[in-house]
Image (cartoon, grey):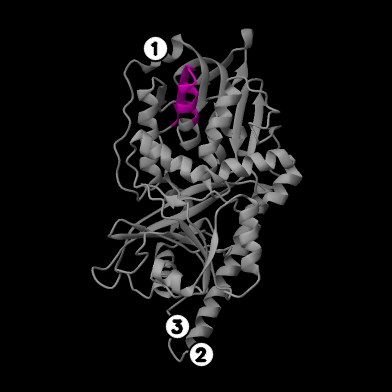
């Protein structure tokens, strides 16, 4: 058995990238300067906000308890998907008003083009690929739900179309799904390499990046409207503080973590066989189906396949995880894989309503949470809004579409996590039973399975 906590600490299975070194003079410089903005967390949000603020002429410091990308930003499924995962345009309008909803959807829909353009302009080496993204389902292609889902995407200003089995087979090498939604402007990146590249860009622009710097207490406003941050490297002063640590916040930023429920995503890489796997995701378009027990696949160069699952317990069997994922791969692509090359996990912050939350934690102290499983596409546009607020933009402006709110703790988060895990487990068992029935009807033999769920 292996614990979920252990998998969250396992090295990421993404390709090794060079660490950003810590400058020897960082401590003294950190103490002797009053910054325009200090950002807690060197993930995608924190680093892109730092870059955006620095290019607006602001003096910026980024404090990171570990190393850039060691938490959610470098430990996700790498998909760049602008569509909302759980809430749609009507829910946004109800919560924020029509003007804010329109501004948010418009900005979010432009994220893939903006992000991939940013990668090219900055010269970041992160295996960026804008070939689209697929969301298949077992529904028949004629089912009216496909049109309902497509209209919901179009309402959110997301470009998408429905593709049927033949085209889906051409893109993926799989006949498992009868139809899918295809979002042509979406794509994928190596999230760890992307985050480390952002860190290097920050330093090149003159931002102070301090690794191994733990925030010990929630930042508080002091005299002359300066904010004092107590850190493991001593006090730091700034005009504005931004906590971009999301749901994995701890120590002095731990209060932010109470605004979301913390889940995990297991990720695994498999070596592809030398023969028989040529057609697996041959067009390099990743897929993630619409089930609650999400099946997702991404080709990593010519040798590996990335997949994973949502764990339903905190104590896990590595063997059972391996069996479950092998069954999925064989069922979708019809191939048997030889070896599990890496297994790790990443955190996911889920808000009860599925909406991102921009929070006023104290005077001149901002925070945000609520990626809801779409962290790359949610984090990237947030940089502009956080930098604008750090530069004294009015919070009520529609140019910052996510409304600024006071912190509200999630009620009974453990119960919410427990219920969600039960729903995922039930969906997983339903799929196992369907697989057995299908094999029986076809006169074949079902793949060996178990009633337990990882």
Which disc, if any, is residue 138?
A: none
Can residue 86 be seen in the rendering of this structure? no
Q: Which mark sits nearer the N-terminus, 2 or 3?
A: 2
Residue 221 lies in quadrant: top right
Q: Which mark sits nearer the N-terminus, 3 or 1?
A: 1
Residue under label 2: 441
Crowd band around label 2 with a 10 angstrom C-alpha radius: few (<14), some (14–19), many (20+): few
In terms of secondary structure, where does tag 3 sit? Answer: loop
Which disc, if any, is residue 446?
A: 3
Residue 40 position in % (x across, y down): 51, 28
Residue 152 position in % (x across, y down): 65, 57
- Residue under the image location 60 percent in, 75 percent down: 142
Q: Nearer the viewer, residue 205 or 8?
A: 205
Q: Which mark sits nearer the N-terminus, 1 or 2?
A: 1
Can residue 101 be seen in the rendering of this structure? yes
Residue 343 position in % (x across, y down): 38, 56
Estimate the spatial distance between the alpha carbons at disc 3 and disc 1, rounded to whole Å: 64 Å
Estimate the spatial distance between the alpha carbons at disc 1 and disc 2, rounded to whole Å: 72 Å
Question: In the rendered structure, are the residues bearing label 1 and label 2 in contact, judged by CB atoms less than 8 Å apart?
Answer: no
Give the extent of the magenta segment: 49-65
Residue 19 lies in quadrant: top left
- Residue under the image location 33 percent in, 36 percent down: 123
Q: Which of 44 and 448 is in front in this view?
A: 44
Look at the picture and state if 198 lies above or below 218. below
Residue under label 1: 28
225 lies left or right of 51: right
Q: Residue furthest left?
A: 274
93 lies left or right of 46: right
Residue 322 position in % (x across, y down): 39, 66
- Residue under the image location 52 percent in, 75 percent down: 432
In terms of secondary structure, where does tag 1 sit? Answer: helix
């Amino acid at each position: 058995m292996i614990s979920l906590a252990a998998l969250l600490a396992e090295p990421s299975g993404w390709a090794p990238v060079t660490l950003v070194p810590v400058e020897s003079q960082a401590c003294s410089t950190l103490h002797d300067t009053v910054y325009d903005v200090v950002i807690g967390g060197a993930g995608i949000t924190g680093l892109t906000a730092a870059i955006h603020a620095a290019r607006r002429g602001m003096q910026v410091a980024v404090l990171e308890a570990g190393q850039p990308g060691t938490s959610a930003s470098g430990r996700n499924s790498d998909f760049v998907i602008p569509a909302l995962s759980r809430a749609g345009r009507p829910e946004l309008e109800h919560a924020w008003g029509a003007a804010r909803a329109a501004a948010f959807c418009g900005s979010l829909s432009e994220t893939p083009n903006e992000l991939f353009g940013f990668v090219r302009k900055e010269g970041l080496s992160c295996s960026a690929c804008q070939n689209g993204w697929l969301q298949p389902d077992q529904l028949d292609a004629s089912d009216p739900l496909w049109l309902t889902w497509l209209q919901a995407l179009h309402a959110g200003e997301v470009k998408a179309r429905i593709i049927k089995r033949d085209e889906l087979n051409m893109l993926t090498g799989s006949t498992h799904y009868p139809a899918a939604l295809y979002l042509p402007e979406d794509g994928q990146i190596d999230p760890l390499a992307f985050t480390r590249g952002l860190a290097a860009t920050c330093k090149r622009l003159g931002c102070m990046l301090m690794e191994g710097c733990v925030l010990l207490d929630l930042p508080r406003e002091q005299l002359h409207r300066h904010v004092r941050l107590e850190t493991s490297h001593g006090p730091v002063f700034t005009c504005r503080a931004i906590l971009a640590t999301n749901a994995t916040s701890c120590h002095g930023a731990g209060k932010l973590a109470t605004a979301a429920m913390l889940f995990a995503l297991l990720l695994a890489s498999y070596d592809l066989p030398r023969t028989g796997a040529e057609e697996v995701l041959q067009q390099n378009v990743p897929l993630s189906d619409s089930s609650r027990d999400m099946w997702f696949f991404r080709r990593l160069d010519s040798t590996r396949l990335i997949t994973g699952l949502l764990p339903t317990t905190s104590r896990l069997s590595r063997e059972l995880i391996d069996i479950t994922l092998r069954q999925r791969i064989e069922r979708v692509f019809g191939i048997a894989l030889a070896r599990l090359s890496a297994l790790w996990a990443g955190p996911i912050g889920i808000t009860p309503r599925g909406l991102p939350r921009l929070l006023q934690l104290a005077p001149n102290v901002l925070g945000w949470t609520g990626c809801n499983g779409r962290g790359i596409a949610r984090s990237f546009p947030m940089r502009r809004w956080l930098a604008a607020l750090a530069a004294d933009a009015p919070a009520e402006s529609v140019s910052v579409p996510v409304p600024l709110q006071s912190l509200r703790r999630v009620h009974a988060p453990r119960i919410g996590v427990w219920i969600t895990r039960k729903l995922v487990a039930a969906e997983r068992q339903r799929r196992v039973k369907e697989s057995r029935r299908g094999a029986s009807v076809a006169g074949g033999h079902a793949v060996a399975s178990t009633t337990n769920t990882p």
